[in-house]
Image (tube, rainbow, N blue to C red):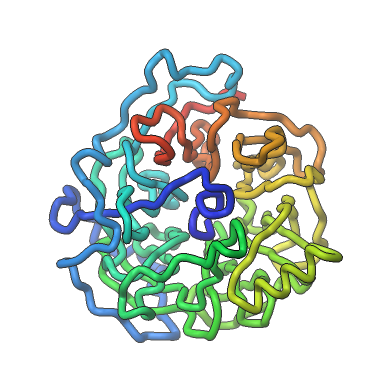
Amino acid sequence: MFKSFAVILFGVLSLFALNANAQFTAPADTAKPKGHNYKLRTLRVAVVDRTSDNSMIEIDSQFRGAKPLPASAIIPLEKHLKNIRQLTFGGENAEAYLSPDGTHLSFQARAMKPGTCDQIFTMTLDGKNVKRISNGKGKTTCSYYFPGNDRILYSTTQFAYGGACPPDPDRSHGYVWSLDPGYDICVSDTNGTPLGRLTDTAGYDAEATISPKGDRIVFTSTRGGDIDLYSMNLDGSDVKQLTSQEGYDGGAFYSPDGARIVYRASHPAGDELREYRELLRLGLIKPHTLEIWVMNADGSEKHQLTHSNAASFAPYFHPDGKHIIFSSNMDDPEGRKFELYMINIDGTGLERITYEKTFNSFPVFTLDGNHLIFCSNRNNTVPHSTNIFIADWVD
């Protein structure tokens, strides 16, 4: 999450764009499951406009259906990954998260063209039936299905900048990314009809995911003057702050039972803390290290899992609730190559999962633990494009 973190901070990924409109093939299910009639507290809704799309997706080439990796791209060291299939081809495709029934993915994508920015899409696990969910305005990130498979939340700047793509962060400060105050969390149904907003506050609101219990949303916000994690009800009410240590806390996911939250954090000190404060004042951040942390769902009993002094992010629970998979550049001295790793919930048993030596991140297990979905630069025909993959998981 977070505007494809590795794209901006380390220059591994590129910009992406989309031009889709009426070319999506399969309508979403229109039935609304009983028990999921959520009422949104904030109801300022954007008008649906399918005549423009800031992502400029090349639909026919970018979404072709799942294809197996060629034999030349198979890496024997990746013993946990078998039968890897590529779901997207070219452009930038990232942060693919499963629907509760395990049949669809929501993700952000764009083509690799100047002046474009991400929009939210869905597809089935075979890489087909692609549909745009966001309205094509602004820039979007961090989509996630509601319980019942009938609605999707995501963060968007569509209410700012007249619906145009937001400006890029000021690179005179080095590798930084923007905590764009234009981001708010909104909700659409799975046909792309906007239903309302969950946040409407000053500052950045993004990186939202939903507990498997179906009771709370965890998200990242700068509403309190720092970058912290908060939780709220599914209608946007009862907002509670979960973290308060100075620094960045974000990219959170719930455990399968909803009892715990795993997240990434950077708590700088000394000169790095002074730099952090100055950049935050400008709406920017440049984390020097990110570590993986776990806490209870109410914010209690925080503890650090990794001590890599590297950029570790995109953590996700294994369905057994005892292991966490994440992405890190801990084995690359230059900090530009990200691999997947697995660690026990108590911080022991660190194991490297991928050996592809470019960018591998945003791992997500299917509910039965039999498959892993992730994003990678592997098997590229266009340099630096990022695609979505699914693999059989072998214990």
**Residue 102 in the image: x percent, y percent?**
42, 45
Q: Residue at (76%, 44%) from the top-left corner?
A: 345
For residue 247, what is the image quadrant?
A: bottom right
Q: Residue at (81%, 45%) from the top-left corner?
A: 307
Q: Residue at (40%, 35%) from the top-left corner?
A: 383
Query: Which quarter of the rendered picture does the C terminus lie within?
Result: top right
Q: Residue at (49%, 59%) from the top-left corner?
A: 3
Q: In the picture provided, is 14 more to the left or to the right than 131?
A: right
For residue 40, what is the image quadrant?
A: bottom left
**Residue 153 in the image: x percent, y percent?**
42, 66
Foreground residue, 11 or 355? Answer: 11
Foreground residue, 3 or 150? Answer: 3
**Residue 155 in the image: x percent, y percent?**
44, 68
Q: In the picture provided, is 81 more to the left or to the right than 265?
A: left
For residue 250, what is the image quadrant?
A: bottom right
Q: How many marks?
A: 0
> Is 374 placed above or below 36 here?
above
> Is 350 placed above or below 211 here?
above
Residue found at the far front of this picture: 172
Q: In the picture provided, is 205 more to the left or to the right than 266?
A: left
**Residue 362 in the image: x percent, y percent?**
53, 45
Q: In the picture provided, is 172 more to the left or to the right than 182?
A: right
Residue found at the far right of this picture: 270
